[in-house]
Amino acid sequence: MITTPFFNVHTHHLPDTNTTAILNCSMDDRAIPAYLQAQLISASLHPWYLTKENFQLQIEWLTEIIQSDSRVVALGEAGLDKICNTPFTLQLQAFRKVIELSEQCQLPLLIHSVKATEELIALHKEYHPAQAWIIHGFRGKKELAAELIRHGFFLSFGKKYQEKALSIVPTERLLLESDEEETDFPAFYEQVASLRGTTSDHIATHIRENANRLFFNR
């Protein structure tokens, strides 16, 4: 359960003391201090770092860490990226494996999506996932946000976003993150609240509720 004022759904850095955060960790992060110190982890199979040679090793690592590390509360980031060098067929193969693990292990899925919305929605329709699919670092326009919300996705916003998109997301589908950025979360919550015409406390309360429902209700 979230007890701190702020929740950060996706970060590559350890949070300050007033923020509960899910640290993104890959197979290659196992020796870094942040991984060893983190309280909550999402286990990542990022399309950028996927190769034919490491594919099976990454799947085996995901399976092992889910079983052995109670800090794992989500899978991802994982997903599809049409502008990176990884063959798209390999990305799809890996992402399907992560989807299956997400469903089998009842872990929400943090998604990296670049120019692959059509494929992503098609996969969501195919799998009908019981677990939440969360688009991390969403930067799209309000029309894309509305389409993804309509298909059941959650959207997580970092410091770079389209104001109109952030303003239309239903509170129950909204999450916030820092990703690679060093983010002042109290100030970020104030910024988001101002844009949405509400208070920081209102935003914080509903995001804590979302987080507790998605990640700590199993």
Image (cartoon, rainbow, N blue to C red):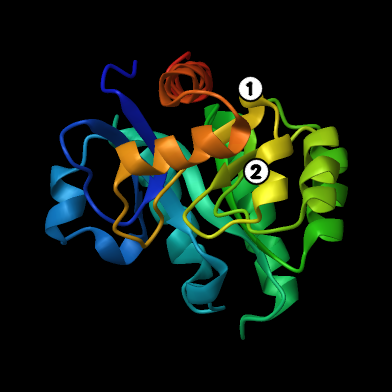
Q: Does residue 66 appear anywhere in the picture?
A: yes
Q: Residue at x 69, y 52 (%)?
A: 96
What is the distance, in whole Å, between disc 1 and disc 2 at their CAs?
13 Å
Amino acid bearing label 1: Glu
Q: Residue at x 15, y 48 (%)?
A: 36
Q: Quadrant of residue 73?
A: top left
Q: Which residue is mark 2?
A: 166
Q: Does residue 131 appear anywhere in the picture?
A: no
Residue 198: give x, y in percent of width and height: 55, 24
Quadrant holding the N terminus:
top left
Q: Residue at x 32, y 57 (%)?
A: 12
Characterize the local packing of mark 1: few (<14), some (14-19) or many (20 or more) Cα atoms within 10 angstroms. few
Residue 48: give x, y in percent of width and height: 53, 74
- Tell me the element at label 2: helix
Q: Which residue is mark 1?
A: 172
Front residue of this view, candidates 62 and 212? 212
Q: Earlier in the sequence, mark 1 or mark 2?
A: 2
Answer with left or right where residue 99 lies relative to residue 110: right
